[in-house]
Amino acid sequence: GENVEQHPSTLSVQEGDSAVIKCTYSDSASNYFPWYKQELGKRPQLIIDIRSNVGEKKDQRIAVTLNKTAKHFSLHITETQPEDSAVYFCAASSRYNFNKFYFGSGTKLNVKP
Amino acid sequence: GAVVSQHPSWVICKSGTSVKIECRSLDFQATTMFWYRQFPKQSLMLMATSNEGSKATYEQGVEKDKFLINHASLTLSTLTVTSAHPEDSSFYICSARPPGLVLEQYFGPGTRLTVT
């Protein structure tokens, strides 16, 4: 089955700096890659996603890039703010079973004011 | 749009008892709902996929007789943890897929279960 690895496990940045979280996947059939933000004790919220027919997607301060050849995708947050502090999860799902999301282990982002 | 609720938000029960958790899609009909389990500071693990009007599809290693899932309507799925034990203590989160979307899942707020 799919194996999604996520790095780093924790990330501290100064307010205004950029943050990058990276994920790799193993199954070449994976074609959908969402990113979720989860604040402590709250629900995971979809913040951005990308499909395999696209190399990059941007939404204001958040962008995701996908390298299908290398099987990795990354979340980029620019001009970070304290409210960006949370745990971020990447996930992947296969074109053969789009119901099953394989989640990365999570990255705890701390934005210091 | 795409709001998913869960009830209760937290529950404490005694070992050996059963607990039911409800997952509702508030502003859409969901033919498919998902149940996840999340241990502290860990990732989400899919337990089962719940389809309205049919049996749930359980992931490998998940005991279907222990974690009973019922998707009785297009807006409600329930997870019943039967004969709960302390090791069942966890954060249970459901998600749902709005109609017309093939891939996206929207998550409920989760239910924290503590078995004493």
Image (tube, coloured by chain):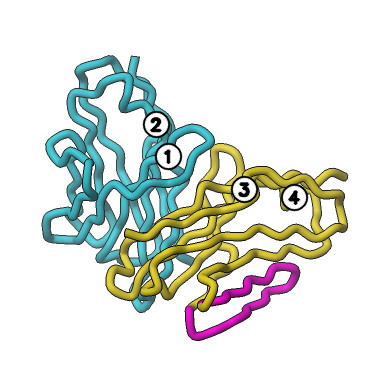
Chain given the colour cyan: B
Please tell me if label 4 and label 2 are on a single chain. no
Closer to the eye: label 3 or 4: 3
Q: Which mark is residue A107?
A: 3
Chain ID, mark 4: A
Q: CA distance from mark 3 to mark 1?
A: 15 Å
Please tell me if label 3 and label 1 are on a single chain. no
Chain A colour? Answer: yellow
Mark 1 vs 2: CB contact within 8 A? yes
Query: Most extreme residue toward the bottom, as rendered?
Result: A53
Q: CA distance from mark 4 to mark 2?
A: 26 Å
> With respect to residue B3, does A32 lie above or below?
below
Q: Hey, what amino acid is under mark 3? A: Thr
Give the residue displayed 68% in from the left and 74% down from the top.
Answer: A59
**Mark 2 lies on residue:** B90
Closer to the eye: label 3 or 1: 3
Element at label 1: strand
Closer to the eye: label 4 or 2: 2
- The stretch of residues the image draws in magenta is A52-68
Whichever of labels 1 and 2 marks the residue nearer the N terminus, that label is 1
For the C terminus of chain B, which image quadrant? Answer: top left
Q: Which mark is residue A83?
A: 4
**Mark 1 lies on residue:** B38
